[in-house]
Amino acid sequence: MQDYNAVFDTLDSAALFINSSFGLDPTISQTDVSTFPETSLGVVAGLHLAQHMYLKGGLYDAKPGRVGHPNGTHIEIRFGDGVFANVEAGFQNGGDKLGVGLWHGTSNYADPLGRRRYSNTGGYLIGERQLGALSGTMPVSVFVMLGLADSNRNMVDQYTGAGATIRGLLPGRPDDQAGLAVARARTSQAYQQAEGVNINAETAFELTYRAAIADYVNIQPDLQYIVSPGAINLPDAGYWGFGPMWPGRCRWCLGMRCRRRTTD
């Protein structure tokens, strides 16, 4: 069983944030993609083309198991399920990364207007950069994420995310991390027509701080502000949370789909 987001469309610096859009962007998570906790059978291959250059591809069953289904999440490969294919190429050197990816799915689904569709296509661009250290001891990283999906076939047709993280912001706390990020998911005209709304995007702001209490325990207070939740006629919403975080655990969070990330 393969988790798509463990291999593709992933940035280390974005892993600090709890909002799921900074893991698997909404243009992809809205599809039948294989990702925790609903994964499917898949195969992944990669190549190192030159110094710091990479190329990797994956092919997945387009109908992952469903958590809570009475028959469980066992593997069923059936004719007509379709496939979800992805290819990503880019540059990676330490904490610096630039990648571009294309995906295509052939599963059977209904678009926002209820029309039956048998294919779906999109792409993404991701990048992160280590900027050095403030005051010589506080490493700073920045990242950007862009996603596109067919506007005639999807609820979300464009995604933009960006953020910055800093390590060791407080004196005597070299392993702590703080971050500020923003994510904007734009809905398609097809979805707006189907829902009868004139709001075209949801925007989320997140401020977070992860305190390293022990080797395997972190405490992470988190503050989020959501503008136009769900891109429908709802008032803006605030969210705050505080709790223990274990590196590698599943983080249930806001957004279309949960993600699991291994933190450092």
Image (spheres, grey):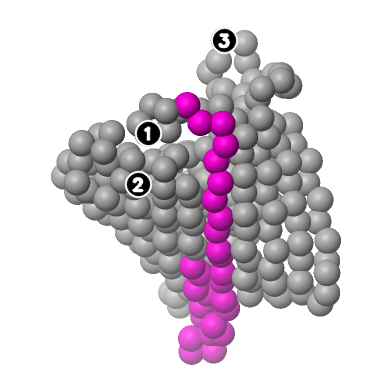
Query: Which residue in the structure is indicated by mark 3?
Result: 70
Element marked by disc 1: loop
- Do tag 1 and tag 2 residues touch (Cβ < 8 Å)? yes
Report whether residue 223 is seen. no
Residue type marked 3:
Pro
Please tell me which residue lies in front, 31 or 153. Answer: 153
Q: Which residues are magenta?
A: 116-144
Quadrant assignment for the C terminus:
bottom right
Specify whether 191 is left or right of 209: left
Query: Which residue in the structure is indicated by mark 2?
Result: 188
Element marked by disc 2: loop
Q: Residue at x 73, y 46 (%)?
A: 58
Q: Position of residue 82 (x, y in %)?
A: 66, 30
Query: Which residue in the structure is indicated by mark 1?
Result: 112
Q: Position of residue 68 (x, y in %)?
A: 53, 18
The Cα–Cα distance between marks 1 and 2, rounded to whole angstroms, is 9 Å
Instruction: Estimate how packed mark 3 is, as few (under 14), some (14 to 19) or many (20 or more) residues with alpha carbons within 10 Å.
Output: few
Q: Residue at x 35, y 46 (%)?
A: 188
